[in-house]
Amino acid sequence: MASLAAKKDGGDINGGPSEEEDQLQQLLGTSCCVNLSDSTVKRGFLLEVRYLWLPRLLSGNGTTGVAPQLYGFVRIKDADHRISGWFPIDCIDLKETGGANGATSCGSSYPTNSAAYNSMVVAKSKITHPIISPVYREVTPGMVRTRREGKQLDFFEERLLRDCRTPTTVRYFIYLCKFAFPPWYYAPYGMLNREYDPLAPLSDAEREALRFTEGSTNESIDTNPFIRDAYLCPFSLRIYSTFEQMQHETLRYRAGHLHPPGLEIYRDDTRGFSMFEVNGSRHVTYCRHLFLLGKSFLENKLAGHDVHNYYFYVVCLHHRHYPHYTDDTSAMYFVGYFTWEKQVTDNNLACIVTLPYFMGGGASSGQQKDLSDDRGPVGADTASREGDTPKLGHFGQFMIAASYELAYRRKNVGSPEKPLTDLGAAAYDRYWKRVLIKWMHTLLEGNAAAITVDDDAGDDGQSVTIVVAHENEAKMAAPGALKRPRPGTTDGSGCAEAVRGARVAEGDTLVDTTVRSIAKQVRLEEADVLRTLLQMGVLHLNAEDRSMRVVIPVSFVNREYGKMKKWAHDMTRAEFDPKLLTGRGGPAWLVNTPSPRRHNQHQS
């Protein structure tokens, strides 16, 4: 038992690598190309090679039916790593080693010249069995310290920091027997599920499957060399390696409780979805599975075992959206969640996660993998088929609006926890833009008296002059035309174009106010207001007297406000209605339930 524990804690897994294994280990980090199903080629580097485990590896009588197929994890050379993943070894071409253009080491930069990719060889000709990352053999100083001090939860976090450098052992999440999508980043599912633990000892069924493969090197493998598809339960959020296991969980163990724990604080019967408030200190197991799922789609997030200090707000679809999955009409299917840390007033949201198929108006085909071949998992179809895309989307905007409303009811405003991911920043930019468009439309409707300098703003508030810009039909530069504003993002480009073709008439100044006053009126943080106004291209700074003015393009504001009115009645968008929110957002004065990890640290 002691030797097994040493292996699982990061020791030498297979008793020391042989010379042949050393040569194969050198292939990890090699530059490669991946031939995708749409005839495109992506460049990247190889991180790991494993077998793909499928239920049909075993026949009905428990004997091996077919040899497992090798898959390689390729980190794609791109702005983000969301398109990286596991690919069949037949689709991977390795760059031959040797010379100045030899293979790069893991973590090194990519070749900059195209000649480095001229000499390629199919990976299958060099790789005949799994190549496990050497990271699992490392024992970090943090792991040694926490193990010596007996702090188990801290040890798990130190191991997570180490294992985040390795690929995930989940190929696809299979959801509602309808959607299949890959995880974007590593999540430590192996800590709760033996099948997904890369350091777990082999089971009898796995050993039987390895016997069917060619090559004597497989006899020396004594730890899990497989990746698997994960069937995600929409109610408990546990993952299972087979559809039958998940179905048994749904029918037997969770019958009558097919919804999240906690309180239902929002219910929209018209669109068919609800939101639950879950206290992390009362429903620890469920919230830990939420954290694991969130880590699969957030790169810089630690999968917290200390969930006691958070409230979780879980959004679910009603049974009518997917009646084929279960006969229980009270069932609610998980869509996404966001968290708020207790007793924190500066931030109104700690993290936000939405399943890929429910982002925006549906899944992007470029981010999903093709499971239409005969190697696809049992019970899963792709959502690219006609009629399979979700009927309700844009849950990210709904959860952002809900987080602000909950903060208002706690007598706070707050802002999301920084730094934001690229997708998170884009979502918040869209939300802040919508809030400011509504404010601008209110001014244009003649309610300028409501925007005045507050008495408590003080003299230190940055003054802002708000003016109205009427779009010039000829869109030609005329005397007195506005200077070109700072370039904004794609969300504000339409507004910037309207300002560039606008002309300010004399007497169109609406009101003199301050940035602080605007932030109070729209109930946002000052920094978020300034960021959004700059990106929209409507905030101008005078270089001479350092004064600022906000130029409101009338036609653009009216057009965008008309879109938002249509969205409010669009049954395919999850629009937030404050009247339907019954929760108080977890009062900030609520005393936290002590965390076991922090309690142990205090005792030690």
Image (cartoon, rainbow, N blue to C red):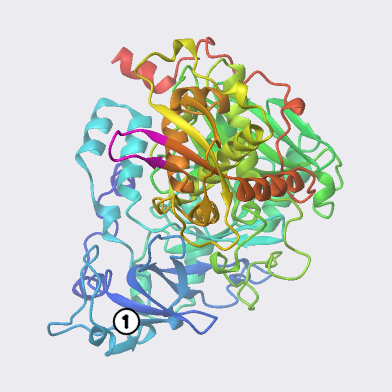
> Residue 546 lies in magenta, yes or no?
yes
Position of 148 relative to 556 (above/below): above
Task: Give the residue displayed 36% in from the left and 30% down from the top.
Answer: 152
Name of the residue lying farthest toward the left: 100
Please report the bounds of the magenta region as a residue range: 540-548
Q: Quadrant of the N terminus?
A: top left
Position of 499 relative to 405 (above/below): below
Task: Give the residue displayed 44% in from the left and 23% down from the top.
Answer: 346
On the picture, is 140 further left or further right than 366? Answer: left
Q: Between residues 319 and 406, which one lies in front from this camera angle? A: 406
- Mark 1 closeness class: few <14, some 14–19, many ≥20 residues within 10 Å: many
Task: Give the residue displayed 40% in from the left and 39% down from the top.
Answer: 302
Where is residue 255 drawn, in percent x and y?
79, 38
What is the three-letter code of the residue carrying label 1? Leu
Secondary element at tag 1: strand
Q: Between residues 275 and 482, which one lies in front from this camera angle? A: 482
> Residue 155 lies in magenta, yes or no?
no
Task: Give the residue displayed 28% in from the left and 75% down from the top.
Answer: 31
Give the total of numbered labels.
1
On the picture, is 580 further left or further right than 520? Answer: right
Where is residue 203 drawn, in percent x and y?
49, 57
Q: Between residues 191 and 468, which one lies in front from this camera angle? A: 468
Q: Magenta: predominant secondary structure element? A: loop
Q: Quadrant of the C terminus?
A: top left
Q: Between residues 501 and 494, which one lies in front from this camera angle? A: 501
Q: Is residue 282 visible?
A: no
Q: Is residue 310 visible?
A: yes
Q: Which residue is mark 1?
A: 94
Where is residue 17 drawn, in percent x and y?
22, 65
Where is residue 171 drawn, in percent x and y?
52, 62
Which of the 4 image quadrants contains residue 132?
bottom left
Position of 119 relative to 357 (above/below): below
